[in-house]
Amino acid sequence: MKILARQVMLETRLFLRRKDDLFWTLAFPLFFIVLFGLIYQDVVWEDLGLRAIEYLLPGIIVMALMTSGIMATASGFVEERERGIYRRLSLTPLKRRTLLGGQLIQRYVVILIQTILLLVVGTLAFDIQISGNLFWSWLVVTLGALCFLSIGFLLTGLIKSARAANGISMIVFFMLMFLGGIYFPNDVMPDFLRTFSNTLPSTNLNDALRAVMIMGLGIEEAWRELLVVGGWFIGSLVVAVRLFRWE
Amino acid sequence: MSTVVEVRALSKRYGSLMAVDGISFSVEEGEIFGVLGPNGAGKTTTVETIEGLRRPDSGEVSVCGIDALREPEPIKELIGVQLQTTSLYDRIRVKEAVDLFGGYYRKAIPTATLLQEVSLTDKKNSYVSELSGGQKQRLALALALINDPGLLFLDEPTTGLDPQARRNVWSIITGLQEEGKTVILTTHYMEEAEELCNRVAIMDHGRIIALDTPSALIAGAGLESRIELDGVDDELRAMLGRTDLPLRMVDSGDGIIIHTKKPSLVLKEIVRTAIQCGVDLSNISVRRATLEDVFLALTGRQLRE
């Protein structure tokens, strides 16, 4: 337990010293909420019955979750593995599950901080009403975190070099972001693209989070979306475990 | 003296390459044991198998009386390892790295003491990425020593270091032996093995082709010493030409090189003739055979090819 706590401290310290991680996980989503907040300040999307910025906030949270869960995880882990850090650590009595546990906890904490930060900026600066149940919202965010972390670790099993990890995780990230209905409702897409988009974890998490957090619907109203996200979580986890490599 | 490491019939194959081919040896407590050989001889595979980093295809390894292949976990507390290249997190300070590793062991040497020992005290707040090659090696050594292990594995600890830094590491290693630690060292530097090791296993193509003390290896190979004379006097040359001493003489351009198994007899003759002719022999050098020559004699190849 003490060693796990120390690993979390270590990962946190390393995270705070990695400028690109800080940029993508904290600055980048904040930049988006401020930018869209300013652009869409007074715009209301009548057919959804929401202010544009209220529509966008859950999407930006989903994007932030993906920067931590997918991008930072895949590139960080592959780089440390490629450099032989895990190999050196395996000579010490440190258990691998403790090492992994420290990373997962640290990422989850960052995800919660990202979410809270975006909510605070959204409500204070742009007057977004969070009318939903916070406990349910937290559950949805946690399911999303698990899902994206699994996808991130799945990628580490597929990708050999750190250089490729940066590129590939970024492609996955942007694909999930742009096809995930994060910046515009996906009903503007042509049919085949919308059908594809509707199967993505980002689209479904986005819709579920919007329903539960912004529209104040019960979590049961979003069961279909949450089922898809849960499916992605379990599916990615199974493949990630199978492909997982320490060396 | 008791046996610290016992390796029996160890084999490891990578594809069609037998990286380690059925080797056996044992390491006694308190000795510096060298594993010497060219790149690709199987040195690293051998030591990394003992350390528990690699699984052999067959064979037995026991470390401090524990079966290393069945129970690798308890051994981790007893050994210290410096890998050929030790990678750490870039953005971690020297002091933090030592603290971090110390926290993994049941007992650990205080960070300040350890940094003192490897002369990194004034670098304790530097990031690992800012260290020079020699400093990184010394940090890696500090991390290997953190749990005060009785048995140390050093994989090419001085490769890539300048002569000054190499001497530095040598004196640390000698100091470790004086503390009673056992050291297993791989190297492809002959002079390093001769200087440091009590016993040396010479490896080539995954096999141990010789194992003994450096001087016994040199003596056992029956090698010739080498006497070099620059700007040699005609009288001396004539004497060496007609003597029946066991020697071979080669012209080296501006002088001669004499190969002999009886250096004292040959030298005595040279000195006698030189005094007779009033030559002062300021250009003479004598070199005994080295492990380099032993390797050449055993394999027909240079060590560093």
Image (cartoon, rainbow, N blue to C red):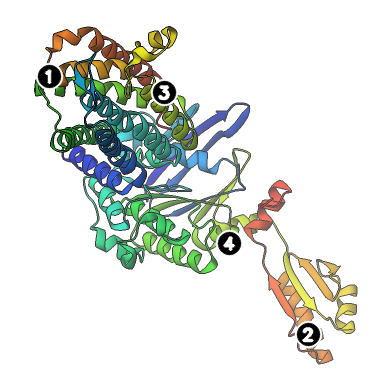
Dot 2 lies on which element?
helix
> Residue sitting at 30 percent across and 43 percent down?
A22
Name the residue that disc number 1 marks. A136
Vertical side of A39 occupied by B240: above or below = below
Amino acid on which disc 1 is placed: Trp
Residue B247 coordinates in the image, percent (x, y): 81, 67
Residue pictured at 64% horizontal, 61% vertical: B290
**Badge 4 and badge 1 in a common chain:** no
Dot 3 amino acid type: Met
Who comes first in sequence, dot 2 or dot 4? 4
Label 2 resides on the chain identified as B
- Which quarter of the rendered picture does the N terminus of chain A lie within? top left
Return the residue at label 3: A175
- Give the residue drawn at x 19%, y 10%: A222
Q: In 3D space, how far apart are the residues under numbered discs 3 and 1 (Cα atoms)?
A: 27 Å
* Left or right side of B189 for B107: left
- What's the distance in space between the residues labelled 3 and 2, CA to CA? 89 Å
| Residue picked out by circle 4 | B191
Given residues B178 and A217, the one toward you in this image is A217
Q: What residue type is labelled 4?
A: Glu
Looking at marks 3 and 1 on the same chain, the residue that comes earlier in the sequence is marked by 1
Q: Which residue position is annotated with label 2?
A: B272
Q: Quick check: A233 above or below B303?
A: above
Residue B250 drawn at (x, y percent): 85, 67
Asked if badge 3 and badge 4 are on a common chain, one would say no
> Viewer-proximal residue, B249 or B165?
B165
